[in-house]
Image (cartoon, helix red, strand yellow):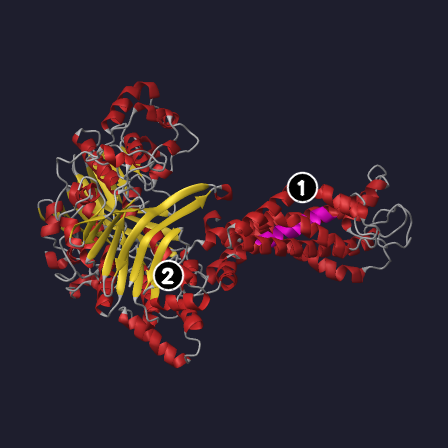
Amino acid sequence: MLSLERVTKVYRLGAFGLQKLIAIRDVSFEIGEREIVSLIGESGSGKSTIGKLILRLTPITSGTIRFEGTDVSTLNGLSLKEYYRRVQGVFQDPFASFNPIFKADRVFRMVRDEFYPQVGMREWNEKVEGALRAVGLNPPDVLNKFPHQLSGGQLQRFLVARALLLDIRLLIADEIISMLDASTRVDVLNLLADLKARGLSILFITHDLSLGYYISERAIILYRGRIAEMGPTDKIYNRPLHPYTEMLMESVPRLDRKWEEEVRIERKAALTGSVPGGCVYADRCPKAMDICTREEPELKEAETGHFVACWAR
Amino acid sequence: MLQVENLTVYYKTIRGYVQALEKATFTIADGEIMGLAGESGCGKTTLGHSLIYLRPPMNYIGGRVVLDGRELPIWDMEKMQEFRYRHISLIPQYAMNALNPTRKIGKMVAELLESRGVSYSEILPELKRRLDLVQLTQDVLKMYPIELSGGMKQRMVMVISTLLNPSLLIADEITSALDVSTQKAVCEMLVEFRDRGFVKSTIIITHDISILYQIADSIMVMYAGQLSEKAPTEVVFQDPRHPYTRMLIGSLPKVGVRYQEERLRGIPGSPPQLLNPPPGCRFRDRCPVAFGRCTEVPPFLEISPGHSVACWRAF
Amino acid sequence: MEQEQPKKVRSEFIFFAWRSAKLRIGVSILLVFVVFAVVGPFLVKYDPYEYSGPMGAPPSREHWFGTTIFGQDVFSQFALGTRSTLTVGLLGGCIGTMVGILVGLLGGYRSGMLDEFLNVITNIILIIPTLAVLIIIAAYLEVRGILTQSLFIGLTAWPWAARAIRAQTFSLRVREFVDLARITGRSSLRIVLTEIAPNMMSYLLLVFILQFGGAVLNAATLDFIGLGPTKGVSLGLIMNNAVLWAALQLGMWWWLLPPGAAIAAIVGALYITNVGLDEIFNPKLREM
């Protein structure tokens, strides 16, 4: 349904845009029907950039993103609007997603103005209430209120309800629960999983490994703009192939086991700056070989459906 | 050793008092790392900060705080100066971003120490030893904060905060902005500092319970300004007695649990308003086992050694 | 981690507005002058240029503010001058604000070459010494009216407003609610008008107040050096004449003091109002 083919995004910074920041480079992956795919990365990995690129919030530098066969960058005006009928997003900060001076319902009105101008008010209100109930909200509790009068969890569900008003096939969930309290996170997470049962695909962008494990069938591990490893969730988590994934699995504080006493030593990371050539992880990788500093590994299939970009494998 | 009795702190706002912390009573032994867990608005930041820096809009309402046998005059900002940094130290959230960008690190430390009446040159050898311990080179003292990475800054802040071997260290969300490997290093550093005797008792304030699972000796769970439960870490995870603790632990996704196999459940509803909180146990409205007596505030009682709960059902 | 958002309840706003001493003082002083500008000229007994009284006479019942060295009624001049000065301030302030908003919003929302281009123009005009340009332009024109004066003042004062508005637009543009509007298919223009501008209302008000004050000052300065409107009277012009005819040395304080004090009071009141409003809009500045 959605495919990214060698997508690269370079940001131009500084006066007259002379400096370059390579956010993601040569990223390719696919999302099929009724699939939840986790895109896992730390800050600086470029994961949010991918979400923005798919949602056409920022232009691609090179490569192609195709949705149902059509190149997304060719869409404009009406065709772009049609695209938004099928693909929507929910972002990280629920409070920042609402214009603070207006009531929260305004986001629904905006959808009506842009997509359903001919629908009557009564029919529309029923549709809105149906969407709210589908996400587990009680309409009288949340309608007609300002964003600051609702909780973060309610606002995120509000936004999912908004996306459901359109007939979407794909939802980009960009860190949507990282700003929620622990007790509400799981409910929103369960909501996403339920939506998948109704035919939706979701790209779940997160930095939290345990969330990815809970909810997705496939996981993509992103490091500094490149895909390190990609494949079925349980394989990635239980038998990771890429040294970075291994480090993640070991270093992330988990609830099922404690950090081991003996830990593989990671080399001291270089401070900042772009990577000259070779694998992006080479400066920290304990398994780095000579070739790793010279040539960048391509993503290769190590076992069925399980891809890794590493010379050591 | 820290003993807190009935500590009550409210926030003054134009609409009245927000009852942020209500009669907190607990003890932390020497060498204990206690995690302070809870969701937003539970009072953990209020508790942590009131121990060292109780200033408006926070208002001291009542209670005693005793550190190593001495009562702390937490309501008196000036008298507390004697204790701050020497006996109690705080690593605030985003501390690493608060380093003065126009000062070299060494100069900043020197100024900080001089303001506390400590000679920089005398303490320099110890400072260097500690820098080595956390794997920072001594050149760091000659650098500006912008030259350091996030992880390095955080380690620097930790060294500075514990330089005078405080009896109590309060760490407020010190891992939130870090990447995974640095997070682990910082956590392990906290344990190391305790093991080497640089710090006696530690309070770790965080919303990330998995970190507490890794390094905390005990965990204290708070809800809406009231203490719910305090117990050794293993006990909190295996045999929690407070319904809130149970539901909270039960709602945490962990690696190994898939949605298809076991559907986790959250806690419906939201915490009460603290401007005029409901009487009695504040978890009452969301509690699946609440009954009549819950309109009376349950005392925070020790039901087994090191394990205290505030719940009528647990007694 | 859920955040607690600052509540922007309307009653809280009014509460602080009322409590703010700065706002009360500033607005009151301004109101006095505005009312005077409207009503004053009707109270005037003499034509301002008429030689209606004794030369250089101190304030009396006949001439409330005394007379000039030529025997003209200072009060008449003052009343009409206040009206004219405030008008220029208002017009010039409006023009400056509007151009600033246009350039700032455009550049801030649509970055890229358009923004770079607007930036360059803004910077160029910013660097040019305003007063020198105004002097040159004014000296060139043989006949100058109030409108022309306002126009030129406004057209030279907009750059800082544009910059400030651009910065604000920039910061708002990357907020998530703008992204949400974009993925709802809203056009850029509509987003700027319905999402971004309303959020900047308080800021735009502050910008306007400062532009108003600046325009009054600039106008007074031009008038003072004799490059004001060729016809009519204004506060700066009164001061110009007073100094030209050695009012101070001759002890005719009533000629120089009222216009000078009025300008200082108007501009001062505007700035105080500005600070007061800033405190209200920005909760972090409030003294609690």
Of the pair B144 and B115, the residue shown nearer to us:
B144
Res C24 visible = no
- Element marked by disc 2: strand
**Is residue A114 depicted above or below A258 in this figure?**
below
Q: Chain of mark 2?
A: A
Majority SS type along the magenta span: helix
Q: Position of residue C66 (x, y in %)?
A: 84, 49
Within-10-Å neighbours for mark 2: few <14, some 14–19, many 20+: few
- Judge left or right: residue A290 versus residue A46: left
The answer for which chain carries disc 1 is C
Label 2: which residue?
A71
Q: Nearer the viewer, residue C80 or C20?
A: C80
Q: Mark 1 vs mark 2: same chain?
A: no
| Residue at 36%, 49% in the rendered image | A8
Is residue C212 a member of the stretch shown in magenta? yes
Along the viewing direction, whichever of B172 and C32 lies nearer the viewer: B172
Residue underneath mark 1: C128
Magenta span: C206-219
Q: Amino acid at mark 1?
A: Ile
The N terminus of chain B sits in image quarter: top left
